[in-house]
Amino acid sequence: MSVIILGIESSCDDTSAAILKDGEILSNCTANQEAHKLYGGVVPEVASRAHQVNIIPVVDMAIKKAGIKKEDINAVAFTRGPGLIGSLIVGVSFAKAFAMSLNIPMIEVNHMQAHVLAHFAENPKPQLPFLCLTVSGGHTQIVLVKDHLDMEVLGETIDDAAGEAFDKTGKLLGLGYPAGPLIDKHAKEGTPRFSFPEPKIPDLNFSFSGLKTSILYFLKKGLKENPNFINENLNDICASVQDRIVSILINKLTKACKQTGIKEVAIAGGVSANSALRQALTDAGQQEGWNTYIPSFQFCTDNAGMIAVTGYYKLQRKEFVGHEVKPIARYAI
Ligand code: KG4
Ligand code: ZN
């Protein structure tokens, strides 16, 4: 018998719903919240309210696009955490109401585990065990994936996430939010001729706060000498910052591969949409003899497809939760 799962994602500022049938994505619909652009970052209260407005239309669209009926759905998988509590509450409450109305089971999903398992939404799929560099607005982790639901974090950021490094740099440069895609765009037209230091962090951990400070001082100095410094050098500054962020990520990933001897290597999370990171992983893979896995754009940033895929693996183990389940802002893999 076929199994159809509705996936729900609402951990930050994207409201997303997806339909998965027997492990295949039929639809993956996301409503982005434009309002945060006005504030230069995600405003939790605004995000929570927008999820409330968006969730029913997005679920409706996912069901229609998949060409199924609501009654065909066998289980609801939802993001329980980590994330903004007010945002998570909307998705969790919706999942409860939906599951109750159809009398179907609920599956709770860890958002970071789901970013990794986004790789199983499409082909080719990584062979187990593999390493996944998960880079988003809130997290930067190197994850050892032993099995679909058995993961170990080998290293992570001790301060800012890689996505934050992009977004905070964007703020200093006067770019909009989220700045990652804008820096990516400007960098394509620039040359990485400015150098920023690589942080000296031991093991497989990351740090991006020092980079942010060095960019701040670099810009202050440049602006003192020339008030138009940013405008005149924007593309080159973006290329230089991006180059450093990418090299920090790839150097640590290379170290992790050497330490573990693993040659199946993936990237995931919003920052894996970055064109330079995608290229650098491909290049490193060719040089080091890795098989590399890069998600298509719809599975990089927050999406419910990855939640439904994770739900599919949990459903096979009958890992259901009761209606007393609560969202949690911090949730380790
Ligand atoms: O995974 P995600 O959608 O949400 C979180 O769970 O945080 O990641 C969002 C992050 C933001 O920091 C955004 O600037 C970054 O991903 N991002 C990018 C690109 N596209 C999104 N960063 C660099 N280059 C991109 N093309
Ligand atoms: Zn995410």
Image (cartoon, rainbow, N blue to C red):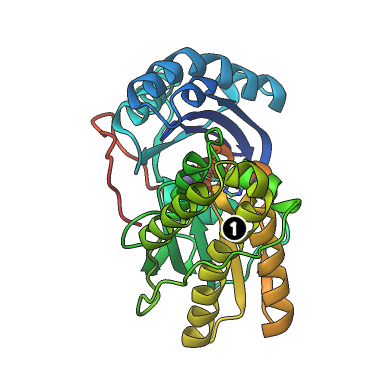
Q: Relative to 42, is 86 on the left or the right? A: left
Residue 313 makes an appearance in the image: no
Identify the residue shown where x is 55% and y is 81%. Answer: 262
Using a 10 Å C-alpha cutoff, classify the residue at mark 1 as few (fewer than 14 neighbours), some (14 to 19) or many (20 or more): many
In-front residue for pair 190/246? 190
Image quadrant where residue 43 sits: top left
Q: Position of residue 20 (x, y in %)?
A: 62, 38
Identify the residue shown where x is 71% and y is 24%. Answer: 65
Q: Position of residue 197 (x, y in %)?
A: 47, 70
In-front residue for pair 53/8? 53
Residue 178's place in the image compared with 220, above or below, is above
In-front residue for pair 320/26? 26
Q: Dot 1 corresponds to which residue?
A: 242
Q: Looking at the rendering, in which quadrant would you find the C terminus? A: bottom left
Amino acid type assigned to the residue bearing label 1 in the image: Gln
In-front residue for pair 248/292? 248
Residue 224's place in the image compared with 199, above or below, is above
Residue 99 makes an appearance in the image: yes
Q: Relative to 142, is 96 on the left or the right? A: left
Identify the residue shown where x is 31% and y is 62%. Answer: 158
Q: Is mark 1 within 8 Å of ligand 1?
A: yes
Q: Looking at the rendering, in which quadrant would you find the N terminus? A: top right
Q: Secondary structure at mark 1?
A: helix
Q: Position of residue 46 (x, y in %)?
A: 39, 19
Tell how many labels.
1
Residue 144's place in the image compared with 9, above or below, is below
Q: Position of residue 32 (x, y in %)?
A: 56, 26
